[in-house]
Image (tube, rainbow, N blue to C red):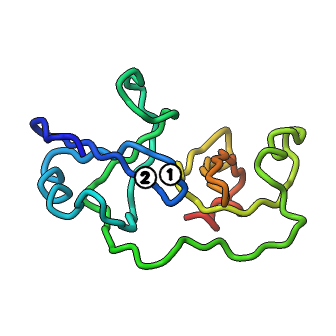
Amino acid sequence: MEPRYHDKQHFILVDTTGSKIEAISYGNNVHRFDTLLQQGCKYILKDVVFGPNWGDLEFRNIGHRFEVTLTRKTRVEPYTFRLQFSPCPKHLMPFHEVIRQPNKTFVDVMGIVVHMEPLEHVGNRLYREVVLMDARWHLIIVGIWSDLFCRNFQ
């Protein structure tokens, strides 16, 4: 945890695999998360906002450009169990193979939804981008077209 500076506070979150991500609280949330989160304790954070961090990586010990924003909607619960992925059939495609597929190819993948963009109108069709994370913590961005698909992700 970094000391508070005016209206924001930075946290470094570490998952069970040792991967790190920077979490930031702003404004009135600084005091709330300063009280809720204790160094060395384990939590489940729900309703956080993922986004790119374009800040300088020179003084950070994190090898990627993503950050988490802790908002007033963020819920904090004690961590009491290991995050489990349900067993899935072997015909689901690994993320690293999805990139090799031709454009507009249908594939079956399994992952946790970590971020959803709002619905957009592109031309006369609805479109949404969804960020998925697989069991090995790899991220993939999926573009979903048509109102049929988008209705399932609202």
- Residue 37 lies left or right of residue 92; in this view the side is left
Q: Nearer the viewer, residue 101 or 37?
A: 37
- Dot 1, crowdedness within 10 Å: few (<14), some or many (≥20)? few
Above/below status of 112 relative to 94:
below
Q: CA distance from mark 2 to mark 1?
A: 6 Å
Q: Which mark is residue 123?
A: none
Q: Callout 2: 10 Å neighbours few (<14), some, many (20+)? A: few
Report the residue at 69% width, 76% height from top: 86
**Marks 2,1: beta carbons within 8 A:** yes
Three-letter residue code for mark 2: Val
User: What is the total number of numbered labels drawn onto the structure image?
Assistant: 2
Seen from the viewer's position, the closer of residues 147 and 63 is 63
- Residue at horizontal 76%, vertical 49%? 95
Q: Pinpoint residue 145: horizontal percent, then vertical percent.
A: 71, 50
Indicate left or right for 119 with 58 as reference: right
User: Residue tagged by mark 2?
Assistant: 14
| Residue 96 lies in quadrant | top right
Q: Residue at x 84, y 63 (%)?
A: 92
Quadrant including the C terminus: bottom right
Q: Quadrant of residue 75?
A: bottom left
Q: Residue visible at 20% across and 64% down? A: 36
Any mark on residue 18, and which? Answer: 1
Q: Amino acid at mark 1?
A: Gly
Q: Quadrant of residue 51?
A: top left
Q: Position of residue 138 (x, y in %)?
A: 65, 48
